[in-house]
Image (cartoon, rainbow, N blue to C red):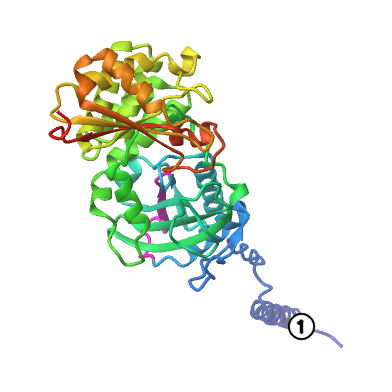
Amino acid sequence: MPTDASSVAAAARSLGAALCGLLLLAGCGTTPAAPPAPEALPMRVSDAPKPPRTAQPLDEAVLSLTVALLDRARLEPPGPSGRHDLVVDPLIDRATGQQTAVTRGMEQRIGTLVRERYPAFNLRPFGTAALDDQPLILLGAITPVAEAGVIPASEAPFPQVYRIWAVLGDLRTGRIVSHETAWVRGPDVDMTPTAFFRDSPAWNREPLTAAYLRTCAGDPGEAIDPAYLRALRAQAHAADGVRAYEAGNPAAALAAYEAASALPGGDQLRVRNGLYLANKALGRDGEAEAAFGAVVAQGLDRGELAVKFLFRPGTTAFWADPAISGDYPMWLRQIARQTEPRPFCLALTGHASPTGPAARAEAVRGRLVAERPALRPRTVAEGVGASQPLIGTGTDDATDALDRRVSFAPEACAARL
């Protein structure tokens, strides 16, 4: 049957349009959509479980602590970037304020978990540039306890369980937004001080450490300790100094400690120890001695100073290695010089680990008197053995060096003179 060409063309066009419309309705008339991106791991879960109240291996305890801390945090909406800036103020040992192998390891593990599992958090170095942006800040500590599930610290030697805890603070609001606790098996815990704290010659109970720990004790909704907030920029510079010293860069460490000392909260023992160590490493003996004199003066004025003299095992003789004890004569000289003009007497207390003698304070007193004879009637020494440990591991190595300290405590002279 004959067909009109124009009619056939029109019919073909109509059929093509109809088929195209059907294809469009079916979603096949365009390039196929890309598959959805895989969901980031994990999304925060506000009702995530709290860590168990049993003692866990260290890695598991840090994992459960971190997940609960970040998942359960009561956060304000993030800034324009859509992410929460986060810094970590280095974790510490509760008793001493020191950073140790275990606190450093915990900090590194937390950082890894944040980077791998929490894309909503932008982990930044703890420094003044980050603080200018008012980030979230994470603090934490560790302490021995009598058993898993309990909170109070234990002073018993040879601890078998430790408690770890951390808080998250929001520097925009000045408040705690999360607080979690976990327990760790004692054999997993290495309390060896990191290099800076191992090398620091002196120790006392720092007001700033107390402010850090008060912040760590805060519950969600409570204010961050104001003394801690005032000192944050100095803390950041001091942390830079610790990192530089431990990286073998004493010049950068010195610059960081000098910057910290000029700021509110910079008048802290960690900074003064740092000035001494950095100057010593740079061969600036005069500046190092002046810095140690400032360490002693601050401790005496605050009523407490402990110095880490290392003795030969079982004796009252100093360790013979000049790399360790070479500065001891200068330390004694500065303690004597700083004490003599002050209007008080000085009580020396010798501490020992469980295996050490109790007569070391008298040996140190004799050296002070040899340096300044006028101190003879103004000084008294006693040994308390291992009855007042700060660390309590009983390992007689770098881990518990502070348990073999000699403490210097000012006291009234009236009854003595």
Question: Which residue is at 29% across, 57% downward?
Answer: 224
Can you say whether 225 is above or below 406 in the image?
below
**Which residue shows up at 37% across the image and 25% down it?**
253
Residue 318 position (above or below residue 153):
above
Q: Residue at the location (34% across, 18% down)?
A: 279
Prevalent SS, magenta region: loop
In the rendered structure, which amino acid carries the disc numbered 1?
Answer: Asp
State the residue in front, 360 or 305. 360
Residue at 27%, 55% (x, y): give it.
225
Q: Position of residue 247 (x, y in %)?
A: 48, 26
Residue 201: image location, x then y, percent: 38, 27
Give residue 380's position: percent from left, percent from top: 27, 29
Q: Is residue 193 visible?
A: no
Check residue 87 for magenta coloring: yes
The residue pinned by badge 1 equals 4
What is the quadrant of residue 254 in the picture? top left
Quadrant where the N terminus sits is bottom right
